[in-house]
Image (cartoon, rainbow, N blue to C red):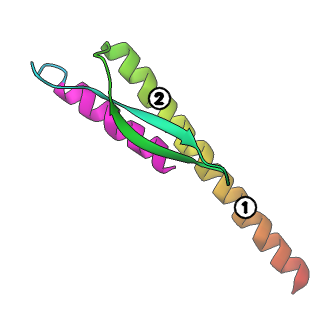
Amino acid sequence: MQAAALQMQSVASNVANAPSQNYQPTAVQQVAQPGGGVRASLVKSPPTDLETQLVSGQEASIAYRANLAVFGAVGRAYKSLLDIIA
């Protein structure tokens, strides 16, 4: 979820600052971690068009919602388990 939020932040900054002459766009680099999950960091990126930035923002939004859905499913599973035990 943090990686997706960082991506949305990067896209927002890139779109807002696109008209600036010396602005250096960013992108999010994600590296898989041995125990699961990813480590995300901002890296410099070559300039891209608005359409590419908007698609990247949509991808980040979908990834965030998908991760949130997983947390919701885990919460419901724990609740069901507690209902069975109790």
- Residue 3, position in %: x, y? 47, 44
Question: What residue lies at 87% left-to-right and 87% top-to-bottom?
Answer: 86
Q: Which of marks 1 and 2 is nearer the N terminus?
A: 2
Q: Is residue 86 above or below residue 70?
A: below
Mark 1, residue position? 74
- Residue 68, position in %: x, y? 59, 52
Question: What residue lies at 52% left-to-right and 49% top-to-bottom?
Answer: 1
In depth, the one of 81 and 20 nearer the eye is: 20
- Residue 36, position in %: x, y? 66, 51
Q: Would you say 15 lies left or right of 43 here?
A: left
Q: Which amino acid does label 1 sit on?
A: Val
Q: What stretch is highlighted in magenta?
A: 1-17
Q: In this view, does 67 lie above or below 49?
A: below
- Return the mark for residue 58: 2
In depth, the one of 40 and 10 nearer the eye is: 40
Identify the image quadrant of residue 44: top left
Local packing at callout 2 (Cα closer than 10 Å; few below 14, some 14-19, many 20+) is some
Q: Would you say 43 lies left or right of 82 here?
A: left
- Residue 16, position in %: x, y? 20, 29
Question: What residue lies at 76% left-to-right and 73% top-to-bottom?
Answer: 79
Count the numbered circles shown: 2
